[in-house]
Amino acid sequence: MSHRTAAWLVTGSHHLAERVRRADAEQGQGTVEYAGLAMAIGVLLLAVGSYLGGKDHGIGSVVTAAIKTAVEHATGGAK
């Protein structure tokens, strides 16, 4: 094997290893971004919840009434 061929093989394997290393380094990037987005949404929900401070804004009663109405319609109405 000539020196030129040996140098070509070493250089080629080095470039291939570098490409594989870069692909591995970026493989989990999407997961990290989604986790960061989920954390940001969680912090926003905590901030809104603490701002409202447990006040009853009628949302619970509206949701409960809608569920009761849906169940009554599904079972054939209230008797």
Image (cartoon, grey):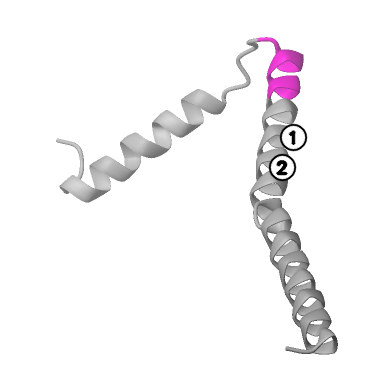
Question: Between residues 35 and 17, which one lies in front from this camera angle?
Answer: 17
Label 2 sits on residue? 37
Label 1 sits on residue? 40
Q: Residue at x 26, y 48 (%)?
A: 73
Q: Which mark is residue 52?
A: none
Residue 48, image quadrant: top right
Question: Between residues 37 and 75, which one lies in front from this camera angle?
Answer: 37
Question: Between residues 44 and 31, which one lies in front from this camera angle?
Answer: 31
Q: Residue at x 67, y 58 (%)?
A: 24
Relative height, residue 9 to residue 33 (above, below): below
Identify the main secondary structure in magenta. Answer: helix
The quarter of the image holding the C terminus is top left
- Whole-angstrom CA distance, mark 1 to mark 2, is 5 Å
Question: Residue flagged by tag 1: what amino acid is it?
Answer: Ala
Whether residue 49 appears in magenta in the rendering, the answer is yes
Q: Secondary structure at mark 2?
A: helix
Question: Residue flagged by tag 2: what amino acid is it?
Answer: Leu
